[in-house]
Amino acid sequence: MRCFIVILILSYAVKPHVLSGESSAEPSIKKHPTFHQRVEGFSLSLNSDEMEYLLNDLPFTSELLRRYKLHTLRVYRMGEGLFYAEDHQGMSGTFRLFMKRPGYREYIGSGVIYSRVAGEVRANVVASVQYHDSGFQSIENDIEFWVLVDNKLLHIFCKIFTPILHTIFTKKIRVFINVVQGLAERIRTNPGILPAW
């Protein structure tokens, strides 16, 4: 779900590109990312079981986003733990479930990002979500992501302009949080929207 979250946050187009040697890439992406951001403690009106269900069936989750006109993201299952995502704004990319345990998911992915300024840029991403019950029908969430641009010159350029990029990413994260909070509210006010499990 982590990569799913990062792909939503980035407002660029990402072509499918499966990262080779993913298990060894995850620590290196985290060690020297071009961007790294963590947002702690935002709440969703879901319980842990509902969150687990949504994370276990990302294609269904993306269907709900479109059904309620919250986002145009579409997620396809390509294999066990492997996904392809795209939306109507031209974003697309592949990601896979890297780590799973109750209350935690981590995803890793790779793609090509199109920028008007830089053109085609390859980037690798690690994204994680952690959550726990915080009250009746409510969970508290922490999200974190690491993006590594696969171009040394652009990597340095992005590092120089980190404060500007941080502001942009903070706005994108706020939009993402509003989208998932909107989905949680639809689920809470529409009993039976999630199949019985």
Image (tube, grey):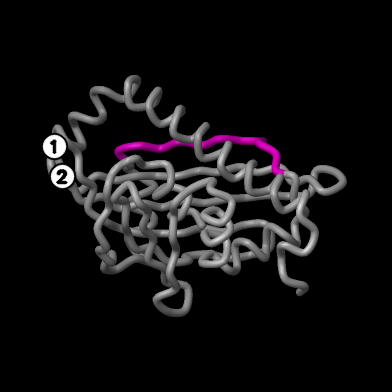
Is residue 72 a member of the stretch shown in magenta? no
Residue 83 vs 151, above or below: the answer is below
- Of all residues, the one furthest to the top in this rendering is 163
Query: At x 59% / y 51%, what residue is drawn?
Result: 68
Query: At x 35% / y 20%, what residue is drawn?
Result: 163
Q: Mark 1 packing: few (<14 Cα in 10 Å), some, or many (20+)?
A: few
Specify the segment rendered in magenta: 34-44
Query: At x 12% / y 36%, what residue is drawn?
Result: 153
Circles 1 and 2: CB atoms closer than 8 Å: yes
The residue to which callout 1 is attached is 118
Q: From the viewer's perspective, is 84 left or right of 117?
A: right
Q: Element under label 2?
A: loop
The residue to which callout 2 is attached is 151
Q: Residue 147, image x and y in percent? A: 34, 44
Q: CA distance from mark 1 to mark 2?
A: 10 Å
Which quarter of the picture shows residue 160? top left
Which SS type dominates the magenta stretch? strand
Q: Residue 142, image x and y in percent? A: 61, 42
Q: From the viewer's perspective, is 21 left or right of 7?
A: left
Which quarter of the picture shows residue 43? top right
Q: Which three-letter amino acid code belongs to the residue tagged 1?
A: Ala
